[in-house]
Amino acid sequence: MESAPMLPEQAKETPSADPAADLKQSVDIGGPRHPFAGLGAPPHTGKRPPRYPPRPLRTPSLHDGDEFAAFTPHVLLDGCEQGRLVVRATSIRGDSHNWEGTCRQDAMLVTRIGPPEAEMLLLAVADGVGSAAYSHIGSYRMSRLAAVHLERDATSLFSALCAGDSAELGALANKAVASAVSKLRSMRERKADNVERAYLDADYATTLHVLLVPTDPAVRERVLFGVGDGGLFLHHAGQWLSVDAAEPPAEGVLDTRTEALPHAYRTVRTRLIRTVPSDVLLLGTDGITNPLTQKDPEFAQLLAGAWCRGEIPSMSDFLWQAQTRAMSYDDDRTVICLWEETA
């Protein structure tokens, strides 16, 4: 989330005239290819790639005393097909963390909740606050604890979703997150009894965004719950549209850019959306949502060319595409995409 120390000086880049063609050229080099031929380095915006290397560098050490950090992998890759719904998901350690030898602070989750008659896909991303000592633990724990508590109210969530009842959905989301916060505190406080450092909420600060999608194709409503930055994009009619979880905060309300669990938030923002089968949904941390929104049209075009032209990528291709590089965007990157195949 927060800006990392500066990497080596990077050259200024200019947008490509045809980024979609560049992406194709980087894959289709012409002529027969060996079946095990690699895709090579991920594509990038601009004429030249960033100067930092596009691969894992130092890894955290057990000697530093943080087992969770030392055992956190550089990359997570997941996906599923549930009826007509297809999911691809990856979480990638950012170039800043690669350079520093620190662990990935993002977390993600792809699972199902609810009984068969009220079943929903649950997709979640969490972005640990860079300055928080144990934000990598906070993002991992909060996403999973929230999912467990949402499962307990899955039938009520499904009914409220079908009824378009935003107030009830918001109440259930706040209940689940509050329960998850309470559980996190109790877990970490017990662990802190055996170490010198006392438990502090701020040490585990993380954002959280959860998307619930009914697996019944007749139900077109989806709901987004959110705390903090990052969030959901919808590709519709050739455009990436940002789907915030609520209206901008009123004066005196905590700025959403500073919101974080478990302590620095006032409510879980809730947004009901309705999609059509041709829409592509992208749920992500700010490592991918920032370059989609902050004056980098080439980046947005590259991802649209890869993910929004009718062909769903394989899991390995999705991982490679998700690593598309953009100058100055060096944070962890977690992205979950959802497609709906037509009958």
Image (tube, rainbow, N blue to C red):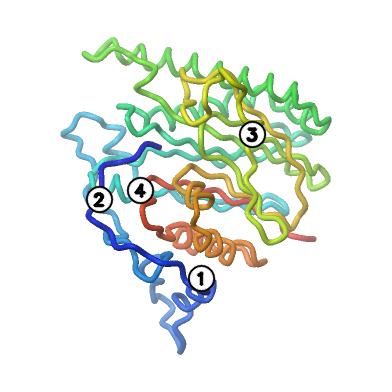
| Mark 2 Cα-neighbour bin, 10 Å: few <14, some 14–19, many ≥20 | some
At x 34%, y 65%, the residue is: 49
Residue that badge 1 annotates:
19
Residue depth check, mark 3 versus mark 4: number of the one nearer the observer: 3
Reading the chain from its start, which is encountered first: label 2 or label 1?
2
Q: Earlier in the sequence, mark 1 or mark 4?
A: 1
* Residue topped by disc 4: 94
Q: Where residue 146 appears, x then y in whole percent?
A: 55, 26
Quarter-wise, where is residue 242 in the image?
Answer: top right
Residue 163 visible in the picture: yes
Seen in the picture, residue 36 relative to 308 is either above or below; the reply is below
Q: Earlier in the sequence, mark 2 or mark 4?
A: 2
Crowd class of label 4 (few under 14; some 14 to 19; many from 20; radius 10 Å) = many
Q: Residue furthest left?
A: 63
**Circle 3 SS class:** loop
Residue at 54 percent across and 29 percent down: it is 227
- The residue mark sitting in front, 2 or 4, is 2
How far is the residue under mark 1 from the one under mark 4?
23 Å
Task: Tell me which corner region of the image, top left, top right, bottom left or bottom right, holds residue 53.
Answer: bottom left
Q: Label 4 sits on what residue type?
A: Gly
Residue 214 horizontal side relative to residue 145, left or right: right
Distance of mark 1 from mark 3, alpha carbons?
30 Å
Q: Residue at x 30, y 27 (%)?
A: 133
In the image, farthest residue toward the bottom: 31
Helix, strand or loop for disc 2? loop
Please report whichever mark, 1 or 3, sits nearer to the chain's N-terminal start.
Answer: 1
Looking at the picture, tell me which residue is in the foreground, 88 or 224: 224
Describe residue 199's horizontal placement relative to residue 109 as left or right. Answer: left
Q: Amino acid at mark 1?
A: Pro
Q: Position of residue 61 (x, y in %)?
A: 20, 39
Asked whether, in this view, residue 283 is left or right of residue 135, the answer is right
